[in-house]
Amino acid sequence: MAHIEPFRALRYDPTRVSIPQVVTQPYDKITLEMRDGYYAASPYNLVRVILGKEHANDHEGQNRYSRASQFFRDWRRQGIFLQDAQPSLYLYVQRFTVPGGGKAELERRGIIALGQIEDYSAGVVFRHEQTLAKPKADRLELLRATRAHFGQLFMLYSDPAGEIDGLLGASHDPDLETRDEYGVSHRVWKIADPGLVDLVRGKMRHKKLVIADGHHRYETALNYRNERQATGETTTGRAGLVPRERASHEGRANGREDEGAGSEPAAAPYEMVMMTLVNMDSPGLVILPTHRVVHELGSFSAAAFREAASAYFSVEEVDASVDAARAAVILREAGRIGTGLLAVAADRVFLLDRPKPVSSNIFSGLSLLQQSLDVVQLHKCLLEGVLGISEEAIREQKNVRYIRDIGESIAQVRSGAANVAFLTNPVRMAQMRDIAFAGEVLPQKSTDFYPKLLTGLTIYALE
């Protein structure tokens, strides 16, 4: 099943830089304003590598990818990054409060490691989202230029008893500690003890992995692996690779450590990718909802919407002045017994629950697992069925914005910037797991795991 390895991570030297000023949120969460802020924070901020600015005179040989490669080489040469002496796993602990969820602090624990890149057909790594060609092409150009992974893929495994987390206690101060712009605490401990590393690896061998965040980067790593294999660097049986009995000595040149004597040949560096592995059964695993805000419809009538929606749901009108806190309570209560959605128009608010039997054409091609999801009911019955927004328009976000915050969603409608906001409960972890293991995918923007993993805490250089 899942094969993981320790590695010699590249990490920022805290005597040369201030860690909070050089690490970033994942590339796909960085807005233009955030990028400008990261640029201003430090000349060594990693945004210059993972999401550098384009220049007016860029061309094929000189562009943001070539600049990323140059920054990375220069910073390694200058000692901004230092490579750990011992192949290690890294315990990664985040402490946070849930946005809009009160002051209670939660803790999420993960293990940063290298994971074997597997085709989905192997039944080891499972996805829950579709990917788009453009982001993968972008990430592939960056990987080709830098030959390094800078952010960890967020991967989930099941361990109801918490056996793996129980192996990883923190008996000393963290090797790295920082706090991000959202107030989340991030701490990292290096785990180099070979016995402990082997225990963790052994436990993980029985696990299947689900991608929580990082689908585009995982498939980029997969495409890059295939690209490198196709160049003739490997032949059948992985000929020419360092055998595992020698990898404990020779493999360190690539920043990795492999199993002892008697195992199969070592994987090439490009056959591994950096992951943070998190127990999906942990109480610290939080999925937030992403609400849909519909705008620029040719016409919208709350009364007409209610009448049309009644063909799909039981519709109850609630107080039109509902605020974010009250909306969250209404949704939570409705969600305890099944589907619950709130439709917020400028002067009317509706609770939609208890879905009615509808024509099978509405859910054509979707399994019963997917049909049970609130977000699928929302897309198929309301966005497509009632409002007539095509699946293509939804995918391309022509009439739909995706917003995490309930208050902001409501405000956009009440300010006149949108026609209607649809507020929803989050997808449950069990729902996501079952759909992923069934080989199916959710609609886009169905899951929002919080908090995100910081980019730049550890770096995996392929050479």
Image (cartoon, rainbow, N blue to C red):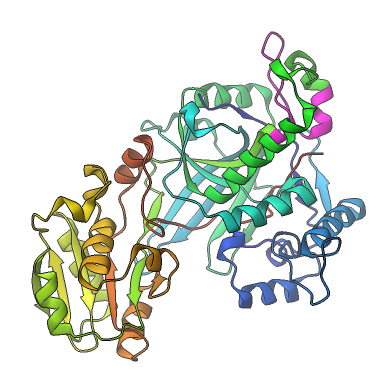
Whether 263 is among the magenta residues is yes
Above or below 238: residue 312: below
Outermost residue on the right side: it is 77
Residue 337 coordinates in the image, percent (x, y) = 13, 54
- Classified by dominant secondary structure, the portion drawn in magenta counts as loop
Please state if 160 lies on the left or on the right of 173 as rendered: left
Residue 145 in view: yes
- Residue at image position (77%, 45%) is 147
Pick the residue in front: 185 or 65: 65
Please state if 321 lies on the left or on the right of 265 as rendered: left
Pick the residue in front: 85 or 206: 206
Q: In which quarter of the image is residue 64?
A: bottom right
Residue 228 coordinates in the image, percent (x, y) = 74, 35
Count numbered badges in the picture. 0
- Residue at image position (78%, 59%) is 65
The quarter of the picture where the C terminus appears is: top right
Whether 82 is among the magenta residues is no
What span is in magenta? 250-270
Please state if 35 lies on the left or on the right of 283 as rendered: right
Residue 370 coordinates in the image, percent (x, y) = 27, 47
Above or below 414: residue 330: above
Outermost residue on the top side: it is 262
